């Protein structure tokens, strides 16, 4: 099986990049074709999880989208992790959420304990340590390499990723500019897996 990442492809039938450790981060605005068809194609391949990011939506429309994506992911037994909208997650019974660090810091202990999967986006060692202390089950560290998603901002690099991985005991997933040429370096730095947006959406 071939997975496309940043206009390059990785043969994930090899041990370089197993699909079981790839997290799909959605962005329907760059999706080629129908968004729900794309989600189903991805879910059929059994990635580690699908994070429904969709940052441009308000909570009402996000909830409508989330219900449909959850239905597709559940059909293929693939974890669907909602993003940012804690209220929506609780209302529709989704126990997996991914949060920016500022939102995580404001979350009550009761809300944190509701979720069986709690993740956070971390941009420093301090972020990572705090996320682990607050009960996160994984973190996403980035952005590692230069990427069009963060134009003008240089990637934080492999030393940054290595420091993050060494600072926590929970799994670390790398994001940002990951390609066939650097995925092995990401694993060598200690990451459990990689997050892919454009490669999977396109």
Image (cartoon, rainbow, N blue to C red):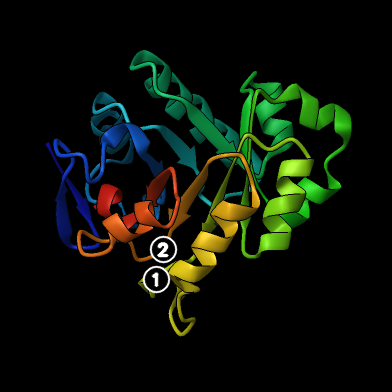
Image position of 129 with respect to 159: above or below: above
Q: Is residue 131 left or right of residue 162?
A: right
Is residue 55 or residue 8 the one in the foreground? 8
Q: Is residue 107 left or right of residue 34?
A: right
Q: Which residue is located at x 37 percent, y 22 percent?
A: 72
Image position of 146 with respect to 107: above or below: below
Q: Position of residue 191 (x, y in %)?
A: 44, 49
Image position of 142 with respect to 51: above or below: below
Tell me where residue 88 sits by quadrant. top right
Q: Position of residue 163 (x, y in %)?
A: 57, 62
Q: Residues within 10 Å of mark 1 (few under 14, many from 20)?
A: some
SS assignment at label 2: loop
Q: Which residue is located at x 27 percent, y 35 percent?
A: 19
Residue occupied by mark 2: 176
Q: Is residue 150 left or right of residue 20?
A: right
Q: Which residue is located at x 53 percent, y 68 percent?
A: 160
Q: Position of residue 171 (x, y in %)?
A: 53, 40
Mark number, residue 31: none
Q: Position of residue 131 (x, y in %)?
A: 72, 47
Is residue 103 or residue 92 the one in the foreground? 103
SS assignment at label 1: loop
The residue furthest bottom is 152
Quadrant position of the N terminus in the picture: top left
- Labels in figure, total: 2
Q: Earlier in the sequence, mark 2 or mark 1?
A: 1
Instruction: Evaluate if marks 2 and 1 touch, with contact meaning CB atoms under 8 Å apart.
Output: yes
- Is residue 158 at all visible to an observer of this figure? yes
- Is residue 142 at all visible to an observer of this figure? no
Is residue 81 or residue 156 the one in the foreground? 156
Between the residue at mark 2 and the residue at mark 1, the CA separation in whole angstroms equals 5 Å
Q: Which residue is located at x 50 percent, y 73 percent?
A: 156
Residue occupied by mark 1: 145
């Amino acid at each position: 099986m071939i997975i496309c990442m940043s206009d390059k492809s990785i043969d994930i039938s090899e041990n370089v990049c197993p699909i079981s450790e790839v997290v799909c981060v959605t962005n329907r605005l760059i999706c080629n074709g129908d968004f729900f068809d794309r989600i189903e194609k991805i879910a059929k391949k059994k990635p580690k999880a699908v994070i429904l990011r969709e940052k441009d939506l308000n909570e009402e429309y996000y909830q409508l989208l989330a219900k449909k994506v959850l239905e597709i992911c559940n059909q293929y037994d693939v974890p669907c992790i909602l993003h940012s909208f804690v209220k929506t997650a609780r209302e529709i019974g989704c126990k997996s959420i991914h949060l920016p660090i500022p939102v995580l810091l404001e979350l009550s202990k009761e809300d944190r304990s509701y979720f069986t999967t709690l993740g956070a986006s971390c941009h420093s060692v301090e972020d990572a340590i705090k996320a682990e202390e607050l009960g996160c089950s994984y973190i996403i560290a980035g952005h590692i390499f230069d990427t069009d998603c963060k134009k003008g901002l240089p990637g934080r690099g492999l030393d940054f990723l290595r420091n993050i991985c060494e600072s926590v005991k929970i799994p670390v997933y790398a994001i940002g500019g990951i390609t066939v040429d650097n995925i092995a370096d990401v694993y060598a730095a200690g990451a459990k897996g990689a997050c892919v947006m454009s490669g999977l959406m396109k």
